[in-house]
Amino acid sequence: MIPTEDASARKRHIEEKLQQEQETLSFIRESLEKSDQLTKNMVSILSSFESRLMQLENSIIPVHKQTENLQRLQDNVEKTLSCLDHVISYYHVAKDTEKIIKEGPAGRLEEYLNCMAKIQKAVEYFQDNNPDSPELNRVKFLFEKGKESLESEFRNLLTRHCKAVPPVIILDLIAGDDEIETSEDPSLNLLPENILQDLTCISMWLVEYGRNLDFMNVYYQIRSNQLDRTIKGLKEHFRKNSSSSGVLYSPAIQNKRKDTPSKKAIKRPGTIRKAQNLLKQYSQHGLDGKKGVSNLAPTEGKEDILDSEIDSYIHCVSAFVKLAQIEYQLLTGIIPEHHQKKTFDSLIQEALDGLMVEGESIVSTARRAIMRHDYSAVLTIFPILKHLKQMKQEFDQVLQGTAASTKNKLPVLITSMETTGAKALEEFADSIKSDPDKEYNMPKDGTVHELTSNAILFLQQLLDFQETASAMLASQETGSSTSTYNFEFSRRLLSNYICKILGNLQLNLHSKAKVYEDTALGAVFLLNNFNYILKSLEKSELIQLVAVTQKNADKTYKAHIDEQLHIYQRSWVKVTSPINENNMPAIQPGTKLKDKERQAIKDRFKAFNDGLEELCKIQKSWAIPDKEQRDKIRRAQKENVTGVYSNFWQKYANVPFTKNTEKYIKYRVEQVEDMIEKLFDTSA
């Protein structure tokens, strides 16, 4: 049982706690009521605000839409005004540009092209929007007039600034001096830079807007004429300076050369002049004692003309290649890429055709000369053909992209020259073999025949043109020029040809020697000719070429010379035979001579004297130009004749076989030697 005090205390405690909870509950109710009231007030405010917003929106949206429409209208008006101004500007184009178009583009190309752009736009507008407008005809007229003015300006600029390049500058250009900078070379600046820019601008406009390609014809015609005049000017330079030993150069290049080493100007190996000089050289050295001028070497006036023509043509070929390269570089900056090759092809035709025609003329002249058996003409073909072959690769590079007919012009000319050269080589070999044995044409003194000097001189020329001559010989055998150069094959071909010439010459010389009634003179003739051939071969590379197919050619000719020397020495038998010991009467010392013995001695002395005088008189006019051979023959004759005579003289000079000693003993041994020493000396 719980005590009463504890229960009361607990009850009070519960009542106090209950009282606190009731107070808390009352506070919560009051708070909820206030919250509800506040919520109702907020809802009322929000509802009022929403209502006001809806009213505001209903008022603003129409205003906004109206403002937007007004803005759109304003933009449309502005655009319309702008378009109207733009359209109206087309109606003023003709008026604004007419004066400039009439005055032309000279001196103000950029401004002129801007005007043409305005006119073109006006034409396009009226064509699209108002094709029946009179303004269209007016701007069309201005556009066409402006285009014509641009074409005319293009022509005028080219004509005014296209001048033939001076020959001295061309010669410097093809000389190819490494020390001369390209930028300093005036020949490379065919057009001033500002003019080139104007031409390029006009060209681009005419292609893009003018729809007219006629200016390309104008370009190639004017530049073609300039190129042709430059080549002809170079020819004229050579014609006027044909007697000069050198060529002039431009002052700028001359000054450059003073302090810097440079390459020599283009040089042509082997000329008519060289042939003439060779002939003179052999005369001076005593290898050729004949008078007159060889068929192979023309007279000096003709020689100078031929030299000038060859030099001129070779330099013109080189100049054409160099100028064509420069022309193509110039053309690429002016002519559209698609039309460059065709325009270039047309541009070079006149100058190229001129070179080809001149080349064919040289070939035709050579053919006519060969028909007349004047084989000196082939000497003009050799240097030219060699140069053309050397230049062919550059020719092909320059002519890339041109028509096949253009590319084939040089090969056709080369083939023509090779054919003509081959014919000349063949006929020359035949002429050596069949040259007639005419008595009046034989050298009276037995010296070198003109045929021999001609043949050797001709062969000497082949040394400078071994590859060229070999190609000719190959075309003669195979019917076409060798496409590749084989050194050994070519050398053997040339060696065979040279040996053929020498073989034909040897046979002909033996035949000609028979024309002489005096066998000894015939021997001297052959000796001189064989010696001339041998010395000529040894003085040049001919001996090496001959050795390719004939190993011991020099020994063969020396044997021929010795053989003729022995034949010649037989002519002195009639001098030495009478005083030979085998033909002398036996005389006993101290005995008196019989009349028969005295007469025999007299006859021997007389026969020796008459024979010696006769031979010395005859052979004194004979010629052995080569000092070495002349001394050799004199020495041999001295040993032969004076040896026999000395014995005879010692044996019978003091024998009393006659009272008139001076009549029979006319010459002492020393005098005989002096007489022999004067053989082959017309001045003695």
Image (cartoon, rainbow, N blue to C red):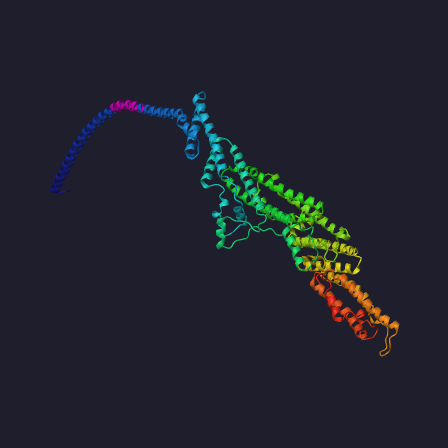
State whether residue 540 appears in this view. Answer: no
Quadrant of the rendered structure where residue 659 is? bottom right
Q: What residue sits 45% from the left and 20% below the top?
A: 132
The quarter of the image holding the C terminus is bottom right
Q: In the drawing, does residue 585 fall left or right of residue 265?
A: right
Give the answer, above or below, for where 130 lies relative to 381.
above
Is 210 contained in the magenta span?
Answer: no
| Residue furthest front in the image | 659
Which of 63/363 is in front? 363
The quarter of the image holding the N terminus is top left
In magenta, the rendered stretch is 54-69
Give the answer, above or below, for where 624 lies relative to 386.
below
Quadrant of the rendered structure where residue 457 is? bottom right
Name the dominant secondary structure of the magenta segment.
helix
Give the answer, above or below, for where 553 lies relative to 297.
below
- Residue 127 horizontal/vertical position (percent): 45, 24
